[in-house]
Image: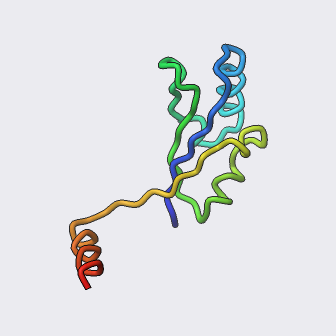
């Protein structure tokens, strides 16, 4: 299963913030009800991390209003072995 960072922007008005938070909470989704919000710092976005099969599957769990503007980023961890293999592959 792949891991994704989901970033969901919304407008910077008080009403837009309240509406976005309410939508997320009403979904009942563990991921969305535990999203992190940047509104207090003027960054009007929510973030959460999701383990799911694909970007399309990740987008489909979002409320329809936010699907178009959401950014979904594939995440990967690297080990020292990964780095050595990459260096060796490029040295050939």
Q: Position of residue 74 (x, y in %)?
A: 50, 58
Q: Residue at x 51, y 48 (%)?
A: 5
Screen quadrant of the C terminus = bottom left
Q: Between residues 26 and 61, which one lies in front from this camera angle? A: 61
Considering every residue shown, the one lying at the far top of the view is 14
Residue for point 72% across, 16% down: 15
Residue at x 57%, y 60% (from the top left corner): 52
- In the picture, measured across the screen, residue 67 lies left or right of residue 78, that is right
- Does residue 5 lie above or below 78 as drawn? above
Estimate the x, y position of residue 84 in percent, counting from the top left: 21, 73
What is the number of callouts on the image?
A: 0
Give the color scheme: rainbow, by chain, secondary structure or one colour.
rainbow
Point 53% across, 38% down: residue: 47
> Between 1 and 64, which is closer to the camera in this rendering?
64
Location of residue 7 with respect to 44 vertically, above or below? below
The vertical placement of 74 against 44, above or below, is below
Q: Residue furthest bottom?
A: 92
Place of residue 34 in the rendered image (x, y in percent of width and height, measured from the top left):
53, 35
The quadrant holding residue 62 is: top right
């Amino acid at each position: 299963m792949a891991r994704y960072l989901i970033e969901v922007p919304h407008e910077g008005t008080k009403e837009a913030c309240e509406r976005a938070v309410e939508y997320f909470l009403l979904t009942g989704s563990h991921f969305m009800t535990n999203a992190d919000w940047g509104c207090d710092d003027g960054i009007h976005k929510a973030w959460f991390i999701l383990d799911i099969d694909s970007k399309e599957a990740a987008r489909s769990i979002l409320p329809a209003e936010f699907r178009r503007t959401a950014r979904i980023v594939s995440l990967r961890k690297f080990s020292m072995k990964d780095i050595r293999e990459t260096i060796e592959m490029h040295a050939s």
